[in-house]
Image: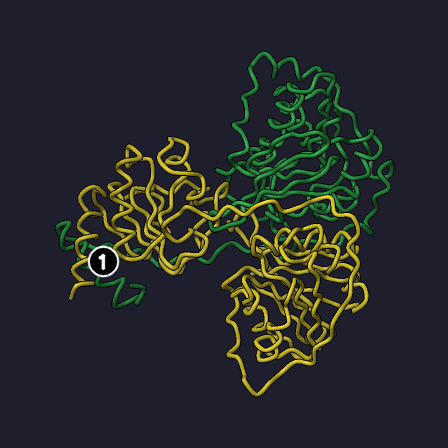
Amino acid sequence: MNIFVCIKQVPDTTTRIKLREDRNGIDESDIQWIISPHDELAIEEALRLREQQPDSTVTVLSAGPERVTDSLRMALAMGADKAVRLNLPGDADSSMNARSLAAAIGKLGQADIVFTGKEAIDDGAAAVGQSLAVFLDMPCVTVVNSINYGDGAITCRRDVGGGSIEVIEASLPAVVAAQVGLNEPRYATALNIIKAKKKPIDILTAEELGVTEANRKTRLKNFELPPPKKPCRIIEGAPADQAKELVRVLAEEIQAI
Amino acid sequence: MKILIIAEHQNGALSEAAMELFGLPFGQAEVHAVAAGEGVEPLAGPLGQLGVAKLHLINSPALASYTGESFGQALGQFIKQLAPDVVLAAHTPQGKDLAPRLAAALDAALATDCIQVSLDGGQVTARRPVYAGKATAEVEFNGDSLKVITVRPRTVKAPEPDASRSADVAEVAVELPGQKTALKEIIASDNVRPDVTEAAIIVTGGRSLGSAENFSIIENFADSIGAAVGSSRAAVDAGYRPYRDQVGQTGKVVSPQVYIACGVSGAIQHLAGMRTSKHIVAINTDPEAPIFQLADYGIVGDLFEVVPQLTEAAKNRNRS
């Protein structure tokens, strides 16, 4: 099978966000970059599928500037066969990213299945999987936490909120957007991380992908940090008195109970 | 300006989040709404009362239950005909799945999960959270292509229905050739409590509970005030709670009226997931825990002592 995985590099969840002086983006100087957590599930799922299906190839794609190379190497260290960076600006929107990922998959061969995360934890747009599927004319199942592989089709369970699950059957080729619970991503071993440093990372340019600034439909600007909070009111006393007072606050001041 | 609202509905009723969309400030814009499904005619009454110039109904047995593919195709065809300037949907599990499909099919600009939308005077601006709420940013739309916008539930107040109003209704026919996806089954939630994304109050526990069994302390308190049970990532990773309950950047982003964090120190990724809660209460032994910087009310103390007392106090209050 020809398996593709689309990943995005994002700031680590422990990052304290600082804004650029012009407030049209964040200060990237002290950021630790990681593969967006749901995209790690997508890589893991692709590797497990390759283990079941001999003669499969896992190709990992990521759109972004030079820094994205580190995340692609991490995907290779986890076990992916090939990695391709789509040389796009770091602030490309989901429309531009999805266009270029679809064009890259089209260029690199007939995909049997495409995995991605249900959303990237930076902009949280949750848009690339579905958009990509439209461009590739494939069905797409989002927020997937389990997959059964059948003959030319897959049966997915998707998390539809409120704890309910939908069971969806989709014909292959298809795009699947991974949710937590789908699998437990493996760690790359130190040895494989070293080996991955020597592996080639192919590059496709925006020109080769036929993507231009016209494909960028939105741009984020005027970033704001949340307003500072008022100081916390500490409720003193013995536990029973503290409890009584808090319940009074919930009932009378906030009127929540 | 022509605006189209996608009226999401479930079991014959408009969803709360869809009704809220009608509360946006539309100015002089021409407001249309569309409902897709099977047997959607009864929605005309309530939609008319919310103030719609024209209501479009896409009725088809093929749309009896939602799939992204069928709804994407049906609404995509209709939107192409109507040619609105802006399409609005709620950022619900369904709206989230659908909007990017429409944007891609219609070569539109997409802004999801917006917390502010202004459509006044022909200018469209939107603001959305980024980095799970660690910051917000304004969405600038390039060019004048169609804009597809999803709005976070509970950020706009739904208008009061006006019984004197009604909508002009039109039926729309669409073609849905060979579908590649099919809904086989819906498995209802086994959660006996409200879901964290829908609850007005959330009581959250962390790894300091020490075991899955000890979470009963949190559950008892939650039950005494009708709250949902939330969990930190550490407690989910330790196997104390299902992922469904996880609040944070890699779990669910929540915005309840009251968020009560018990023994949760407040890792940055957790704070990102709950910082927009209206009132935040922290209970923690460590007065320096970061959670106190976000909290409105705090108790410095051991949750194993304080929380059972809270349950008791809440029950006493219910009795009196």
The chain letter of the green chain reads: A
Q: Can residue B290 be seen in the rendering of this structure?
A: yes
Q: Quadrant of the N terminus of chain B?
A: bottom right
Say above or below: B42 vs A123. below
Amino acid, disc 1? Leu
> Which scheme is used to colour this image of the protein?
by chain
Looking at this view, is B214 or A168 the one in front? A168
Q: Chain of mark 1?
A: A
Judging from the image, what secondary structure is the residue with disc 1 in?
helix
Rendering coords of residue A93 (x, y %): 71, 48
Q: Can residue A8 be seen in the rendering of this structure?
A: no
Looking at this view, is A49 or B140 the one in front? A49
Rendering coords of residue B128 (x, y %): 58, 57
Q: Quadrant of the C terminus of chain B?
A: bottom left
Looking at this view, is A85 or B87 the one in front? B87
Q: Is residue B126 left or right of residue B202?
A: right
- Outermost residue on the front side: it is B61
Other-residue count near label 1 (Cα within 10 Å), few / some / many at <14 / 14–19 / ≥20: many
Q: How many marks?
A: 1
Q: Which residue is mark 1?
A: A246
The chain letter of the yellow chain reads: B
Rendering coords of residue A157 (x, y %): 57, 40
